[in-house]
Image (cartoon, helix red, strand yellow):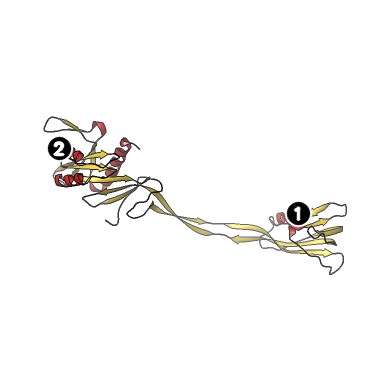
């Protein structure tokens, strides 16, 4: 940011606040000049006007994007311009504040003093500790029906009735076929789940896989036993996953603006939202 950006932001703030109070920008930048009683033309950063219904009043706003505080010399210069041009009021806007003598002299000359401070990344508004500017709330209703194939039962048809085998996790079990090939049990489970995807939700489906001279093998213990078949029972589970989510829409605070004499304070967001401090 440079001084031109700072002037632009100040102009924008006064324009936005003026929409409610009837204040209008009638001059801005290098072309904003007012000729005084002395015959000298004075450049005014921002010149505003408002009316009480009978008379029009003008305010000259001087923007100072300085790294140091504004002293009485600057205040004296603005006061002399106000006196020469018969402008009703003068205002100085500074990012670093004012010296003690500058404040005292401005108060005596009826010059308004404004601090317009940029809040940098990671820095907080020291007064209210806010870092975000609330904009509104977004409510989203999600309508979701989740279909998931679910295996309800796995049953092995052993050659020897009532024979038992230590059944480990399915990814540790393989089926050794008659021709010497070995197929992971998980392949049968995945194939069955694919079939369930095409079935009616909630309907129990049963599928039998028949084997000849096959063995069920535990890869960990190497234990094996003869089986002649495998029965899988499952269903396509339909689950209602509807929910509602609430999102708070916020914008980052960019500037804090406060008037030293009028005791007003405003928060300005990066999207250009302006909010008056509730504490004032």
Image height check: is 199 above or below 5?
below
Lateral position of residue 125 relative to residue 22, left or right: right
Which is more toward the observer, 203 or 228? 228
Relative image position of residue 31 (x, y in whole percent) = 24, 31
Quarter of the image for residue 163 reads bottom right
At mark 1, the secondary structure is helix
At mark 2, the secondary structure is helix
Lateral position of residue 100 relative to residue 216, left or right: left
Image height check: is 32 above or below 129?
above
> Which label sits on residue 262?
none
Which is more toward the observer, 113 or 233? 113
Relative image position of residue 58 (x, y in whole percent) = 18, 41
N-term mark: 2 or 1: 2
Name the front one of labels 2 and 1.
2
Number of numbered discs on residues: 2
> Which label sits on residue 187?
1
Residue at x 69%, y 61% (from the top left corner): 235
Relative image position of residue 30 (x, y in whole percent) = 25, 31
Residue at x 26%, y 39% (from the top left corner): 63
Q: Which residue is mark 2?
A: 80
């Amino acid at each position: 940011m440079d001084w031109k950006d700072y002037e632009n932001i100040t102009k924008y703030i006064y324009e936005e606040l003026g929409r409610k109070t009837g204040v209008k920008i009638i001059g801005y930048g290098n072309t904003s000049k007012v000729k005084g009683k002395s015959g000298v033309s004075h450049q005014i950063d921002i010149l505003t006007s408002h009316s009480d219904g009978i008379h029009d009043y003008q305010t000259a706003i001087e923007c100072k994007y300085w790294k140091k505080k504004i002293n009485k010399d600057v205040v004296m210069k603005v006061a002399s311009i106000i006196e020469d041009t018969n402008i009703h009021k003068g205002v100085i806007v500074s990012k670093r504040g004012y010296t003690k003598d500058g404040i005292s002299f401005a108060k005596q000359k009826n010059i308004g003093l404004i601090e317009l401070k940029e809040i940098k990344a990671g820095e907080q508004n020291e007064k209210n500790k806010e870092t975000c500017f609330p904009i509104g709330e977004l409510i989203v209703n999600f309508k979701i029906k989740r279909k998931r194939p679910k295996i309800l039962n796995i049953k092995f048809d052993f050659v020897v009735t009532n024979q038992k085998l230590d059944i480990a996790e399915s990814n540790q079990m393989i089926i050794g076929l008659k021709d010497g090939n070995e197929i992971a049990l998980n392949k049968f489970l995945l194939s069955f789940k694919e079939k369930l995807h095409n079935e009616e939700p909630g309907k129990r489906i049963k599928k039998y896989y028949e084997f000849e001279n096959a063995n069920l093998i535990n890869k960990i213990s190497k234990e094996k036993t003869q089986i002649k078949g495998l029965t899988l029972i499952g269903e396509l589970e339909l689950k209602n996953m509807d929910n509602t989510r609430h999102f708070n829409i916020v914008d980052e605070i960019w500037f804090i603006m406060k008037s030293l004499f009028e005791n007003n304070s405003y928060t300005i967001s990066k999207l250009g939202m302006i909010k008056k401090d509730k504490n004032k």
